[in-house]
Image (tube, rainbow, N blue to C red):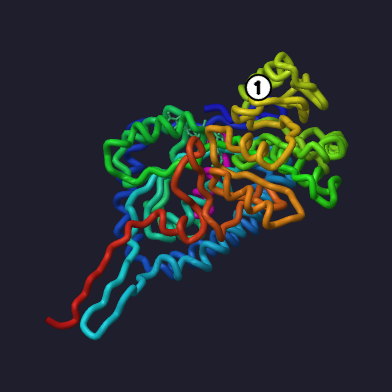
Amino acid sequence: MKILNPATGTEITEITEDNRETLLKKFETLKMGLAGWSDTGLNARIDIVRKFSSLLESEKDILAKSLSDETGKPLQQALNEINGARTRIKWLTENAAQYLSDETMTESADMVEKISYEPLGIVCNISAWNYPWLVGVNVWIPALLAGNTVMYKPSEYATLTGLHVDRLLKSAGIPEPCFQVAIGEGKVGELLTEINFNGFFFTGSYSTGQKIYNAVAGRMIVCQLELGGKDPLYIADDVADVNAVAAGTADGAFYNNGQSCCAVERIYVHEKLYDAYTEAFLKEVASYKIGLPSEPGVYIGAVTRKAQIKLLQNQVDDALQKGATLAAGGKKIEGEGNYFEPTVLLNVNHEMNVMREESFGPIIGIMKVKDDEEAIRLMNDTEYGLTASVYSSDQERAQKILKKLDVGTGYWNCCDRVSAAVPWSGRHHSGFGATLSHQGLRAFTKPKAWQLRKSK
Ligand code: TXE
């Protein structure tokens, strides 16, 4: 398998993909590691994971460069990702003892009722490329803390990062048979779904999530899916500082080239502020530096997958054909690498694909609405349900709107952010199950109820 640099189109290296035989061998290895790892005390596991986090700190420049080279992400954003991964690991390690230890629920003179959290066993994590460190940490860190062994399949667009993960986990003290990496494209993922894992944790697109869910459905095992989104954002008519809000929300749409599961994908603006907001938004977008990910100050790097350029162009063409106005960008940037201009479409509506299909790129539609009710109706008009955001100076008004939205995360005066302290979960085509928070720690366990009578 060739690893290409999406910013230059050049080959970085070539790596041998796994096949059915090598995957089965790795699975057998993980089986051998399970008993020893789950018997290792929780405190010892936490110590190893903390060591891993300090290795990330000491190698962050090497890791960021490698991530930037294989995904086209600006170097600074790659560094931010590694720092962000360390913040998540900190929360998970600080809270693991509280949420993974036995809990006594009732205790009387002769009876104790408690819960213990046992590892699921050997779990498989098939993962995405857009934030390989962050979405990876969400899964393999709590899985390992809880005593599972893990098969990690990084995306074929983040293979080098996957190999760094493996190397650094082992350097930190994770025993060889407790963590294995599966290398390859979609067909390797497909082969993994045929293997008898005790749980599947997938991060990626809706269509692949659906295939994986179908493939493992008959086996009565845990299957958790973190999928895409078409996340809406509403600007109410009472925001105080339109310029600051326009800059912050443009960042929510264009950071990482819009390739974030919780990127702002459609914007609704109250008619009273529409002109002022769009003017400030366009000014902000015009200020973005586009260029090689390694160049200082670059904000828009390369789009990771070449095929996405065609999807973005189709969305623009479809919108223009149906009456949208092109206010910025609109096409591929000619030359080496997968570059697409940061694109803003106005006068959009829900007949257009750009307001309904995930774009996963540097493109946004902005639509005028007359009141909160119209905004709520349009924000809910989607097959996805990951996040939604409301900007208003009135918390009560914002929360009233957010309560009516069928999403896993509601943001007030912020967007495109993930915190380890609260669950990360989708609804509908955005998937189900949760990572992060206490729920995400326990997602890799099966509860055992203990009913213990002290005397007969
Ligand atoms: O997904 P793909 P990508 C979402 C994001 C977007 C998608 C982008 O919104 O929709 O992920 O990630 C493997 N059987 N999120 O392009 O193509 C493939 O090799 C088994 C959501 O990577 O679905 C890769 O390793 N596996 C999010 C992985 O599946 C298969 C956070 C994902 O590939 C397979 C981040 C098959 N048939 C991104 N085909 C959230 N909600 O938290 C491919 N794969």
Q: Looking at the picture, how far across and down is residue 252, in whole percent?
A: 71, 43
Disc 1 designates what residue?
Answer: 352
Which is nearer the eye, 381 or 154?
381
Which is nearer the eye, 164 or 84?
84
Q: Is residue 72 visible?
A: no
Query: Magenta part mainly helix, strand or loop?
Result: helix
Which is nearer the eye, 423 or 108?
108
Q: Looking at the picture, how far across and down is residue 338, in whole percent?
A: 70, 25
In the rendered view, tell whether residue 336 sits above or below residue 200.
above
Circle 1: residue type: Met
Q: Is residue 447 visible?
A: yes
**Per the image, is 168 magenta?**
yes
Q: Residue at x 56, y 60 (%)?
A: 421
Tell me if 196 is positioned left or right of 13 in this view.
left
Which is nearer the eye, 351 or 316?
351
Q: Residue at x 72, y 40 (%)?
A: 371
Q: Is mark 1 within 8 Å of ligand 1?
A: no
**Label 1 neighbourhood size at 10 Å, few (<14), some (14-19), many (20+)?**
many
Q: Looking at the picture, how far across and down is residue 89, in whole percent?
A: 55, 59
**Per the image, is 316 magenta?**
no
Label 1: element kind: loop
Quadrant where the image shows the C terminus = bottom left
Q: Looking at the picture, how far across and down is residue 427, in whole percent?
A: 49, 42
Q: Residue at x 57, y 40 (%)?
A: 160
Tell me if 367 is positioned left or right of 189 in this view.
right
**In the image, farthest residue toward the left:** 456
**In the image, farthest residue toward the top:** 321
Which stretch did the figure color magenta?
155-169
